[in-house]
Amino acid sequence: MQYAQSDLQLAHIGTNPGVLYETLCFHLQQAVEKAIKAVLIAYQIPAPKAHNIDVLVGLLPSTLLKPSVLVEAATLTEYAVGYRYPGEADPVTEGEYRQALQIANETVQWANSMLEQIACEGETDT
């Protein structure tokens, strides 16, 4: 989760001069990807080297309560590659950045709560 938190913090720098929304959204996608992978690892599910958030969400245990933000989070997958290279997509708007920021914040919070829950379950097993 430390890596997810780091990417999320980088994306929070916002509209500093010279920082592209595409760059910020890349870090938001990375935060979500790493947060979901942390939950997978906590459940002892191998986390693939994949950037597709929908695929990662699909690997979560079927018994796990998945909030609707995880469906929204899948939309951030496009920021993993497509927006990193000039001319391949329309520029990211401030509104798109703010929406991605909200989704990433909620997803990372969900992942943190899942990890806390798993840790508590582990303590009661001993």
Image: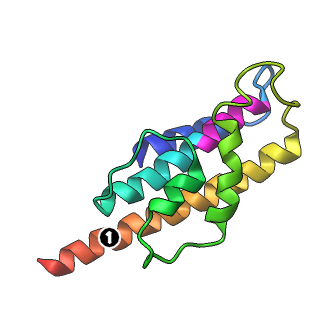
Relative to 102, is 7 above or below?
above
Q: Main secondary structure of the magenta part?
A: helix
Regarding residue 14, the answer to whether it shows in the image is yes
Element at label 1? helix
x 83%, y 46%: residue: 96
Looking at the image, how many numbered discs can be counted on the residues?
1
The residue drawn where x is 63% and y is 53% is 104
In this rendering, would 102 be left or right of 121? right
Q: How is the image coloured?
A: rainbow
> Does the magenta-highlighted stretch encompass residue 51?
no
Q: Is residue 41 left or right of residue 3?
A: left
Place of residue 54 in the rendered image (x, y in percent of width and height, measured from the top left): 59, 55
In this rendering, the answer to whether 5 lies above or below 17 is below
Q: Is residue 13 visible?
A: no
Comparing 105 with 41, the one in front is 41
Label 1 belongs to which residue? Answer: 118
Give the quadrant of residue 112.
bottom left
Residue occupying the point 70% across, 40% down? 78
Question: Measured along the vertical axis of the image, is residue 98 above or below residue 87?
Answer: below
Q: Which residues are magenta?
A: 21-29
Circle 1: residue type: Ile
- Which residue is at the front of the view, 97 or 49? 49
> Residue 108, image x and y in percent?
54, 56
The image shows residue 7 at horizontal and vertical percentages of 55, 38
Q: Quadrant of the C terminus?
A: bottom left
Q: Residue furthest left?
A: 126
Q: Position of residue 49 (x, y in %)?
A: 43, 38
- Where, by quadrant of the figure, is residue 2 drawn? top left
